[in-house]
Protein backbone atom coordinates (compact mmCIF):
# COMPACT_ATOMS: atom_id res chain seq x y z
CA UNK A 1 0.00 0.00 0.00
CA UNK A 2 0.99 3.65 -0.34
CA UNK A 3 2.20 5.84 2.51
CA UNK A 4 -0.95 7.98 2.53
CA UNK A 5 -2.58 8.52 5.93
CA UNK A 6 -5.43 6.04 5.53
CA UNK A 7 -7.16 7.07 8.77
CA UNK A 8 -7.33 10.66 7.57
CA UNK A 9 -8.64 9.67 4.13
CA UNK A 10 -11.26 7.43 5.75
CA UNK A 11 -12.38 10.30 7.99
CA UNK A 12 -12.84 12.49 4.95
CA UNK A 13 -14.65 9.78 3.03
CA UNK A 14 -17.01 9.37 5.99
CA UNK A 15 -17.84 13.06 5.74
CA UNK A 16 -18.66 12.67 2.06
CA UNK A 17 -21.14 9.91 2.88
CA UNK A 18 -23.24 12.21 5.04
CA UNK A 19 -21.37 12.20 8.33
CA UNK A 20 -20.48 15.55 9.87
CA UNK A 21 -17.21 17.24 10.69
CA UNK A 22 -16.03 18.01 14.20
CA UNK A 23 -18.30 21.07 14.38
CA UNK A 24 -21.39 19.05 13.53
CA UNK A 25 -21.64 20.46 10.00
CA UNK A 26 -20.72 19.02 6.64
CA UNK A 27 -17.68 20.86 5.26
CA UNK A 28 -16.69 20.46 1.61
CA UNK A 29 -13.45 22.35 2.24
CA UNK A 30 -12.26 19.40 4.31
CA UNK A 31 -13.07 16.95 1.53
CA UNK A 32 -10.15 15.46 -0.41
CA UNK A 33 -12.23 15.84 -3.58
CA UNK A 34 -12.55 18.85 -5.88
CA UNK A 35 -16.22 19.86 -5.60
CA UNK A 36 -16.60 22.76 -8.06
CA UNK A 37 -19.70 24.93 -7.93
CA UNK A 38 -21.81 25.61 -11.01
CA UNK A 39 -21.28 29.12 -12.33
CA UNK A 40 -17.78 29.51 -10.91
CA UNK A 41 -14.31 29.50 -12.46
CA UNK A 42 -11.16 27.91 -11.05
CA UNK A 43 -7.47 27.85 -11.86
CA UNK A 44 -6.00 24.34 -11.86
CA UNK A 45 -2.41 23.15 -11.98
CA UNK A 46 -1.51 19.52 -12.66
CA UNK A 47 1.87 18.13 -11.58
CA UNK A 48 3.84 14.87 -12.00
CA UNK A 49 2.15 11.89 -10.33
CA UNK A 50 4.67 9.76 -8.46
CA UNK A 51 3.16 6.42 -9.55
CA UNK A 52 3.31 7.18 -13.29
CA UNK A 53 6.13 8.03 -15.68
CA UNK A 54 6.93 11.75 -15.39
CA UNK A 55 6.27 12.23 -19.11
CA UNK A 56 2.82 10.61 -18.99
CA UNK A 57 -0.37 12.60 -18.31
CA UNK A 58 -0.87 12.27 -14.51
CA UNK A 59 -4.40 10.89 -14.93
CA UNK A 60 -5.27 7.61 -13.23
CA UNK A 61 -7.62 5.16 -14.94
CA UNK A 62 -9.49 2.43 -13.07
CA UNK A 63 -12.89 0.70 -13.22
CA UNK A 64 -15.91 0.66 -10.94
CA UNK A 65 -19.42 -0.81 -10.73
CA UNK A 66 -22.57 1.20 -10.17
CA UNK A 67 -24.74 -0.78 -7.76
CA UNK A 68 -28.22 0.20 -6.63
CA UNK A 69 -28.91 -0.11 -2.92
CA UNK A 70 -32.23 -1.62 -1.92
CA UNK A 71 -33.06 1.00 0.70
CA UNK A 72 -36.29 2.47 -0.61
CA UNK A 73 -34.54 5.45 -2.15
CA UNK A 74 -33.11 3.85 -5.29
CA UNK A 75 -29.69 5.17 -4.25
CA UNK A 76 -26.50 4.14 -6.01
CA UNK A 77 -22.96 3.41 -4.88
CA UNK A 78 -19.75 3.16 -6.87
CA UNK A 79 -17.75 0.02 -6.10
CA UNK A 80 -14.17 -0.45 -7.24
CA UNK A 81 -13.68 -3.39 -9.66
CA UNK A 82 -10.43 -5.31 -8.94
CA UNK A 83 -10.95 -7.68 -11.88
CA UNK A 84 -11.19 -5.04 -14.60
CA UNK A 85 -8.56 -2.80 -13.04
CA UNK A 86 -5.95 -5.22 -11.73
CA UNK A 87 -7.04 -8.68 -12.96
CA UNK A 88 -7.87 -9.73 -9.39
CA UNK A 89 -10.99 -11.38 -7.94
CA UNK A 90 -14.13 -9.23 -7.78
CA UNK A 91 -17.24 -10.29 -5.82
CA UNK A 92 -19.49 -8.03 -7.89
CA UNK A 93 -18.25 -9.52 -11.16
CA UNK A 94 -18.78 -13.03 -9.73
CA UNK A 95 -22.44 -12.29 -8.96
CA UNK A 96 -23.00 -10.67 -12.33
CA UNK A 97 -21.34 -13.59 -14.10
CA UNK A 98 -23.57 -16.10 -12.29
CA UNK A 99 -26.76 -14.24 -13.16
CA UNK A 100 -25.55 -13.73 -16.74
CA UNK A 101 -24.90 -17.46 -17.19
CA UNK A 102 -28.18 -18.51 -15.59
CA UNK A 103 -30.48 -16.39 -17.74
CA UNK A 104 -31.27 -17.02 -21.38
CA UNK A 105 -33.27 -13.83 -21.91
CA UNK A 106 -31.15 -11.41 -23.98
CA UNK A 107 -33.05 -8.33 -22.76
CA UNK A 108 -32.28 -9.25 -19.16
CA UNK A 109 -28.62 -9.78 -20.04
CA UNK A 110 -28.38 -6.38 -21.71
CA UNK A 111 -30.01 -4.63 -18.75
CA UNK A 112 -27.72 -6.35 -16.28
CA UNK A 113 -24.73 -5.28 -18.35
CA UNK A 114 -25.91 -1.68 -18.78
CA UNK A 115 -26.61 -1.18 -15.08
CA UNK A 116 -23.74 -2.87 -13.30
CA UNK A 117 -20.88 -3.77 -15.64
CA UNK A 118 -17.58 -2.08 -14.73
CA UNK A 119 -17.17 1.42 -16.15
CA UNK A 120 -14.00 3.41 -16.64
CA UNK A 121 -13.30 6.08 -14.03
CA UNK A 122 -10.72 8.88 -14.19
CA UNK A 123 -8.99 10.79 -11.39
CA UNK A 124 -6.14 13.26 -11.17
CA UNK A 125 -4.40 15.08 -8.32
CA UNK A 126 -4.53 18.83 -8.91
CA UNK A 127 -3.69 22.12 -7.23
CA UNK A 128 -6.88 24.20 -7.09
CA UNK A 129 -7.27 27.98 -6.88
CA UNK A 130 -10.69 29.59 -6.56
CA UNK A 131 -11.06 32.19 -9.30
CA UNK A 132 -9.57 32.83 -12.74
CA UNK A 133 -6.08 33.70 -11.45
CA UNK A 134 -3.55 31.58 -9.50
CA UNK A 135 -3.91 33.81 -6.46
CA UNK A 136 -4.25 32.96 -2.79
CA UNK A 137 -3.41 29.59 -1.27
CA UNK A 138 -3.64 26.53 -3.54
CA UNK A 139 -5.32 23.38 -2.24
CA UNK A 140 -4.42 19.87 -3.36
CA UNK A 141 -7.53 17.87 -4.33
CA UNK A 142 -8.60 14.73 -6.18
CA UNK A 143 -10.46 15.71 -9.35
CA UNK A 144 -12.79 13.11 -10.84
CA UNK A 145 -12.77 13.83 -14.58
CA UNK A 146 -15.63 13.55 -17.02
CA UNK A 147 -14.97 12.08 -20.45
CA UNK A 148 -15.13 15.45 -22.23
CA UNK A 149 -12.72 17.04 -19.75
CA UNK A 150 -10.35 14.10 -20.06
CA UNK A 151 -10.38 14.37 -23.85
CA UNK A 152 -9.82 18.14 -23.71
CA UNK A 153 -6.78 17.69 -21.46
CA UNK A 154 -5.32 14.93 -23.67
CA UNK A 155 -5.69 17.22 -26.71
CA UNK A 156 -3.48 19.78 -24.95
CA UNK A 157 -0.74 17.17 -24.66
CA UNK A 158 -0.92 16.61 -28.43
CA UNK A 159 -0.67 20.35 -29.10
CA UNK A 160 3.01 21.35 -29.62
CA UNK A 161 2.29 24.76 -28.04
CA UNK A 162 1.55 23.10 -24.71
CA UNK A 163 2.86 19.52 -24.49
CA UNK A 164 3.64 18.46 -20.91
CA UNK A 165 1.25 20.85 -19.16
CA UNK A 166 1.99 19.11 -15.82
CA UNK A 167 5.76 19.68 -15.99
CA UNK A 168 7.01 21.00 -12.64
CA UNK A 169 9.39 23.50 -14.28
CA UNK A 170 7.57 24.41 -17.50
CA UNK A 171 3.88 23.67 -16.97
CA UNK A 172 0.63 25.49 -17.71
CA UNK A 173 -2.23 26.64 -15.56
CA UNK A 174 -5.71 25.62 -16.70
CA UNK A 175 -8.77 27.81 -16.44
CA UNK A 176 -11.75 25.61 -15.57
CA UNK A 177 -15.27 27.02 -15.86
CA UNK A 178 -18.20 25.05 -14.46
CA UNK A 179 -21.66 25.15 -16.00
CA UNK A 180 -24.97 23.33 -15.62
CA UNK A 181 -25.81 20.70 -18.23
CA UNK A 182 -29.24 19.37 -19.15
CA UNK A 183 -28.43 15.99 -17.63
CA UNK A 184 -29.87 15.09 -14.23
CA UNK A 185 -28.35 12.57 -11.80
CA UNK A 186 -30.44 11.54 -8.78
CA UNK A 187 -32.40 14.77 -8.90
CA UNK A 188 -29.42 17.10 -9.30
CA UNK A 189 -28.06 18.82 -12.42
CA UNK A 190 -24.83 17.35 -13.74
CA UNK A 191 -21.89 19.72 -13.99
CA UNK A 192 -20.07 20.42 -17.23
CA UNK A 193 -16.51 21.74 -17.52
CA UNK A 194 -14.84 24.08 -19.97
CA UNK A 195 -11.04 23.82 -19.90
CA UNK A 196 -8.67 26.36 -21.45
CA UNK A 197 -4.89 26.61 -20.89
CA UNK A 198 -2.79 29.67 -20.16
CA UNK A 199 -0.20 30.24 -22.87
CA UNK A 200 2.69 31.11 -20.55
CA UNK A 201 4.71 28.20 -19.17
CA UNK A 202 5.74 28.55 -15.53
CA UNK A 203 7.38 26.54 -12.78
CA UNK A 204 5.57 25.42 -9.66
CA UNK A 205 5.67 28.20 -7.06
CA UNK A 206 7.22 27.69 -3.63
CA UNK A 207 3.73 27.80 -2.11
CA UNK A 208 2.55 25.09 -4.51
CA UNK A 209 5.59 22.94 -3.71
CA UNK A 210 4.86 23.38 0.00
CA UNK A 211 1.23 22.28 -0.45
CA UNK A 212 2.35 19.17 -2.34
CA UNK A 213 4.98 18.41 0.30
CA UNK A 214 2.59 18.77 3.25
CA UNK A 215 -0.59 17.22 1.87
CA UNK A 216 -1.13 13.49 2.63
CA UNK A 217 -2.83 13.22 -0.77
CA UNK A 218 0.44 13.88 -2.59
CA UNK A 219 1.59 10.33 -1.84
CA UNK A 220 -1.79 8.72 -2.44
CA UNK A 221 -1.89 5.80 -4.83
CA UNK A 222 -5.30 6.56 -6.32
CA UNK A 223 -5.79 3.00 -7.56
CA UNK A 224 -4.70 1.12 -4.45
CA UNK A 225 -6.38 3.50 -2.03
CA UNK A 226 -9.63 3.42 -4.01
CA UNK A 227 -9.45 -0.36 -3.91
CA UNK A 228 -8.91 -0.14 -0.15
CA UNK A 229 -11.98 1.99 0.57
CA UNK A 230 -14.31 1.24 -2.34
CA UNK A 231 -13.55 -2.44 -2.95
CA UNK A 232 -16.30 -5.09 -2.76
CA UNK A 233 -14.92 -6.48 0.50
CA UNK A 234 -15.52 -3.07 2.15
CA UNK A 235 -19.17 -2.74 1.12
CA UNK A 236 -20.77 -5.02 3.73
CA UNK A 237 -24.53 -4.39 3.88
CA UNK A 238 -24.47 -2.30 0.70
CA UNK A 239 -23.18 -5.21 -1.38
CA UNK A 240 -25.47 -7.73 0.33
CA UNK A 241 -28.44 -5.46 -0.36
CA UNK A 242 -27.45 -5.12 -4.01
CA UNK A 243 -27.04 -8.89 -4.43
CA UNK A 244 -30.51 -9.44 -2.93
CA UNK A 245 -31.96 -6.76 -5.20
CA UNK A 246 -30.35 -8.21 -8.30
CA UNK A 247 -31.52 -11.70 -7.40
CA UNK A 248 -35.06 -10.49 -6.82
CA UNK A 249 -35.28 -8.62 -10.11
CA UNK A 250 -33.66 -11.53 -11.92
CA UNK A 251 -36.30 -13.93 -10.56
CA UNK A 252 -39.02 -11.53 -11.70
CA UNK A 253 -37.40 -11.35 -15.12
CA UNK A 254 -37.56 -15.12 -15.47
CA UNK A 255 -41.34 -14.97 -15.12
CA UNK A 256 -41.89 -11.79 -17.15
CA UNK A 257 -39.55 -12.53 -20.04
CA UNK A 258 -37.93 -9.10 -19.66
CA UNK A 259 -35.90 -7.40 -16.98
CA UNK A 260 -37.42 -4.90 -14.50
CA UNK A 261 -33.96 -3.75 -13.43
CA UNK A 262 -33.59 -0.06 -12.44
CA UNK A 263 -33.17 2.50 -15.24
CA UNK A 264 -29.68 2.93 -16.59
CA UNK A 265 -27.63 5.65 -14.91
CA UNK A 266 -25.99 8.49 -16.83
CA UNK A 267 -22.73 7.48 -18.51
CA UNK A 268 -21.31 10.98 -18.15
CA UNK A 269 -22.34 11.98 -14.63
CA UNK A 270 -20.08 13.28 -11.91
CA UNK A 271 -22.10 11.82 -9.08
CA UNK A 272 -18.96 10.43 -7.48
CA UNK A 273 -16.03 12.82 -7.23
CA UNK A 274 -13.53 10.06 -6.51
CA UNK A 275 -13.64 9.22 -10.18
CA UNK A 276 -16.29 9.92 -12.73
CA UNK A 277 -17.78 6.98 -14.58
CA UNK A 278 -17.33 7.51 -18.31
CA UNK A 279 -19.14 4.52 -19.79
CA UNK A 280 -18.31 0.94 -20.59
CA UNK A 281 -15.89 0.16 -23.37
CA UNK A 282 -16.87 -3.50 -23.83
CA UNK A 283 -19.35 -5.15 -26.16
CA UNK A 284 -22.65 -5.93 -24.35
CA UNK A 285 -22.53 -9.47 -25.71
CA UNK A 286 -19.32 -10.17 -23.80
CA UNK A 287 -19.79 -12.01 -20.44
CA UNK A 288 -18.24 -10.55 -17.29
Image: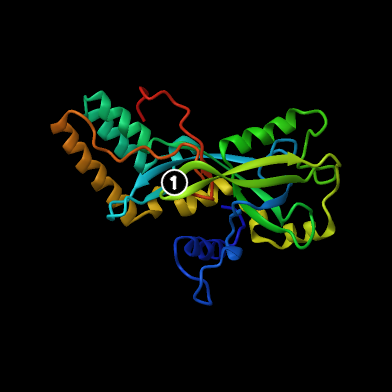
Between 181 and 203, the residue placed more toward the observer is 181
Task: Please report the residue visible at 74 percent of the width from the left and 28 percent of the height from the top.
Answer: 158
Q: For the residue labelled by badge 1, is the local secondary structure a helix, a strand or a loop? A: strand
Answer few, some or many: residues within 10 Å of disc 1's Cα (few below 14, many 20 plus, some between 14 and 19): some
**How did the renderer colour the structure?**
rainbow
- Quick check: 197 left or right of 145? right
- Quick check: 98 left or right of 225? left
Residue 49 visible in this rendered orientation of the protein? no
Task: Please report the residue visible at 21 percent of the width from the left and 30 percent of the height from the top.
Answer: 258
Q: Position of residue 71 (x, y in %)?
A: 28, 55
Q: Position of residue 271 (x, y in %)?
A: 48, 48
Task: Please report the residue visible at 78 percent of the width from the left and 46 percent of the height from the top.
Answer: 173
Between 147 and 228, the residue placed more toward the observer is 147
Residue at the farthest left position: 255
Q: Position of residue 69 (x, y in %)?
A: 32, 51
Q: Which residue has dot 1 on it?
A: 185
48 is higher (above) or lower (below) than 16: above
98 is higher (above) or lower (below) than 105: below
Instruction: Give the quarter of the image for residue 210.
Output: bottom right
Task: Please report the residue visible at 32 percent of the width from the left and 50 percent of the height from the top.
Answer: 74
Residue 196 visible in this rendered orientation of the protein? yes
Query: Which quadrant, please, contains the C terminus?
Result: top left
Residue at the farthest bottom position: 23
Amino acid sequence: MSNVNLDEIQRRLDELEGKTNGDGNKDDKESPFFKPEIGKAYTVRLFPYMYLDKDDPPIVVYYQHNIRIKNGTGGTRWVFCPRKTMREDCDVCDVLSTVWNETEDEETRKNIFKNSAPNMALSVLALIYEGEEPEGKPTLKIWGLQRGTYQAILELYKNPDFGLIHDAKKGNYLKVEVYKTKKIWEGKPVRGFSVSPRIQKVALTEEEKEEIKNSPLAKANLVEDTAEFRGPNKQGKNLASWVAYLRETYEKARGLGSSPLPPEGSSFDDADDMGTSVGNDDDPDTPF
